[in-house]
Structure formats: structure tokens, C-alpha cells
Image (spheres, helix red, strand yellow):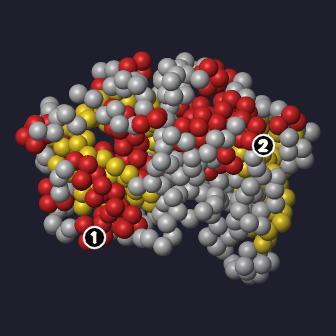
Amino acid sequence: MSEAAGELRPVTDYVKLPKDGEPYLEGHKCKSCGTIFMGARNVCSKCFARNEIEAVKLPSKGTLYSYTIVYRSFPGVEVPFVSAVVDIEGGGTVKGNLINVDPDPAKIEMGMNVDVIFKDAGRTDKKGNHYISYFFQPAA
Amino acid sequence: MSKDDVYVIGTDMIKFGRFPDRTVPDLGAEAALLALDDAGVGIQDMQALYCGNLFQASGMVGQRILHQIGQTGIPVVNTANACATGATAFREGWIAIKAGLYDMVLAVGVEQMGRGLLGGGGSGDGISTEGLLGSGTMPTVFAELGMEHQKKHGTSFEQFAKVAVKNHHHSTMNDKAMYQKETPLDEVMGAEMISYPNTKLMCSVNVDGSAAAVLCSEKKVKELGLMDRAIKVRASALTSDPYTDRDLVMPDFSTCTRLAAKQAYEMAGVGPEDLNLVELHDCFATAEILHYENLGLCKDGDAGKMIDTGATALGGKIPVNVSGGLLSKGHPLGATGIANVYEIVTHLRGKAGKRQVEGARMGMTHVVGMGNAAAIHILEKP
């Protein structure tokens, strides 16, 4: 990958930014047992099948499995925010920020449907590169 | 493998606290000497040293302890296994005696901690993902597990908070705990929220500390005439995390704990109803609730009720974390597993003073390490 300043990069390796088309989450699915992992691998850690893993495009829909509201984080991180664990429709689980909700346990419903959206992370690295991240928000 | 049992003949810990002017080997050496003195033996009697330390895992801490207390040329094994580091060192000593290699070994756990949050998203060349892809801090990891329990069983913020009230109360009777301070329920619930539902008083304390234990074969215990003070290791179990859904995102400390508990109960031929006290891994108040069920102390879904009824407080049916636990005694990662052994042994010897669990015959220690590891030991007064 080029090191040119101002480049647009994915926030993590399972965020894909196709040249033509919308960003998406990429899972790695075991063809033997159907388990979906985030991140590439050669062997399935559930059924131990080798070389049966294929990259799959995951849907941008899921349900809220668990969450917490973070009030204390590392210096410079804006709080409060909702750290959410989301089961993606069809398999795979990811953690991310749940946005466009009040950070209040009374307002956040376990099991609620969420959409996965992609936008600028609002952070740049030392070389000035920008990053596209994913976020969750209540389903439209 | 030897059919003979393995015993703890000496154990001690330093008072947990903050000692920025001391070194890791220095802290470890103090606990090692205390444990040797408790057993009435010397470093020259030890045939191996198992040393648990996490943050200086590449630093040959065990050897550096021997440089302070006696360089006898014995094998040293340095262990690192996240928060199960100390328990892993203890277990390695147990394995070596069980294998028939040695009759007497020393296990030491020691840690010097910074202050503040542990965990968080790493960055490397890119950007930090903390607060972007959720949070990776330890309070968050265990808050999300607590919220999962709340979703399944209706466990309330107040019930989680009661764990901290109980453990901080227990530590008022333990001079070696970091804190000796009552924290009423309103104070716990009203403390700074860190990651909902864990407030600051529901998070374990980062402290420096060390603990040590002398392990001995049955033959040698009898030869030394130490059976009157020896405590039998009835079971030792160590697991990693079997695959479960979501475990790469939500570390699953329950499945590895349940697996270790099953193995430990089977090895000892006992059940949870036979235990008189438990020191379990209350790194956060939410975690203690989960582990009541994971260790079989109550049925699944009954942990909230269990804290409500006082069953796990001193004087209750099965006192948990009478030492004050990680929440109040403090959690120096590598030392915690062996400090738990010290606590159980002290009760089984009837020497725990004001916090003594009356008539204690059998106790359990439990730790988990993020990554994951779970370690359980069952100890019994012979």
C-alpha cells in the first residue's frame, strides 16, 4: 500500500473499501461448519478444518447482543459512548460504537435491530492518513 | 504420576499496596522468605522455583529473586498467563511434585502495577481504535458480560453493586488488604461510573504485591513432621477458552471457568456443596456474579438472589472473597493466584482472625486470565 499522505484507509482489516461500491464488513466463513470469523485465518478454530475458509461479504444489519456505556476511557477519548456487541445478520459478531442513541440504559434495548454504517473515523494517523470506520445505529 | 498428595506447608503474602521505590524481585523475595519461614524450611531445601509475573515476563524474575535470597542452582520456570499467572506458577509446582520429580518446591507470584485502566485498542502504525470500535478496556469487557447476565437473568445494577459492598466490608478484617474501608451501597452506586454498571468501587484495585507458597510431597511432609500444618491440594485445574460464539469480541470467561470447575470437582471427588469458602476472580463486581453460577455455587440465574440473601458474605452459607477480593484486597496480577492460596490455607488452619470462616475444612481458589485462562485449586485440611 502506498504511504502517500491523506490516503483513505480502512480502520481495521475486516472493513473493505471497494473502488466501486459501498464499504462493507468482510467475514471469513468456514465452509465446513459455517462459522464466521472476523479476520483472515487458514484453520477453523471451532471444527479444526484446514483450508476451508473463504472471505464473505457481510450484510450491514444486525442485532444488539450486549453493550456498556463507557464513562472513563483513555486520555483524549471522548466520553460517554456506547460500546456495543452486535451479532451480524447471518453470522459473525463485531464490537463497535453505537451512535445516534442516548447513552442511557433506559433508552437502549437489548436485541434491538441496528444498521451498520460507514463514515470517516474522525482520527488521522501521524502520516495524515484518514480512516473509514463502521458504526452501529438504531435500524431505520 | 504419583498417587501421593501434594501439600502446602508454608505460605504468606505481603500487605498489598503501592511501592514505587521497590523492585519486582525485591517484592517477590520478601514473600518468598515469608513463605519459607512459615514452613520452617530454607531456600537450600527447595528443588525448583516457579515464578509468576506478567509485566516483566521477559525479565527472568524468578532468577532475580534467587539473586536476593540464595543462588542454589535450582531450575527456575517463569510463568506468564495474564491474571492466571500466579495460579499457573503454583500449578506447575504441583505438577512437578505430582510427577515425582521433586519433593519440595517454591512458588512465587509478584507484580508491580501502574495506575489506571488496563486494556484498550492497540494501534501500531494506524490510529487507536479505543472509543471508535467500542472499548477494549477491562472495565468495559466485564461490563458487557454483566449486561449479558442482566439480559438473561434480570440482574440489577444494585445487585452487582452489593458485591463491592460485601468485599470492601470483608477487607476491613484483613490487614494485608490494600483498603480497610466500609463502602455502603449508596456510596458504591454513587461512585464515578467507569463502564455501566461498574462504578469505580466495583473495579479491582491496581496494586503492587507478592505472595508465595512452599509445596511438598506427602512423603516429605511426613518425614519433616509437618502434617499438623500442611494443607492438602485436592485438585488443580487449568483451562484455556474453548471456542464459543462471540468469544473473539466478548472474551468468554464463563466457559473456561465451568470447564476448570468440572475438572477440579471430578479430581477432588467433591461438589460445590462441600466447599466452606471460595476466593474467586472478582476483577469487577459483575464478574463475581457470573462466577457464582460458573463454579456451581448456585443455579444458573440465581446469582443475583445469592448476593441479595447474604449467602456469600462472611457468616453466610458459602462465604466468597472473605479476604476482600480483588476489589478491595487489590489485584497485583501475577501475585493474585497465590494470594488466593494464602487466604484459603489461612482459614483452613483456623488462623484468619476476625474474618475466620468457622470450621472451614475445604476451600477453592479461582482466577481467570484474559486471553483466556482459568485456574482452579481445591484445598483441604487433612
Looking at the image, the residue that sits furthest to the front is B354
Q: Which mark is residue B190?
A: 2
Looking at the image, the residue that sits furthest to the left is B223
Residue linked to disc 1: B68
Crowd band around label 1 with a 10 angstrom C-alpha radius: few (<14), some (14–19), many (20+)? few
Q: Position of residue A17 (x, y in %)?
A: 76, 60
Residue B145 visible? The answer is no
Q: CA distance from mark 1 to mark 2?
A: 45 Å
Q: Position of residue B93 (x, y in %)?
A: 25, 48
Residue at 65% across / 54% down in the picture?
B137
Quadrant of image for the C terminus of chain B: top left
Q: Secondary structure at mark 1?
A: helix
Q: Amino acid at mark 2?
A: Gly
Quadrant of image for the N terminus of chain B: top left
Residue B226 to residue B107: above or below: above
Which one is in front, B174 or B251?
B174
Q: Position of residue B308 (x, y in %)?
A: 65, 23
Please state if A37 lies on the left or on the right of A18 as rendered.
Answer: left
Q: Position of residue B269 (x, y in %)?
A: 30, 21
Residue at 33% across / 20% down in the picture?
B270
Q: Amino acid at mark 1?
A: Gln
Q: Earlier in the sequence, mark 1 or mark 2?
A: 1
Please state if B29 lies on the left or on the right of B188 as rendered.
Answer: left
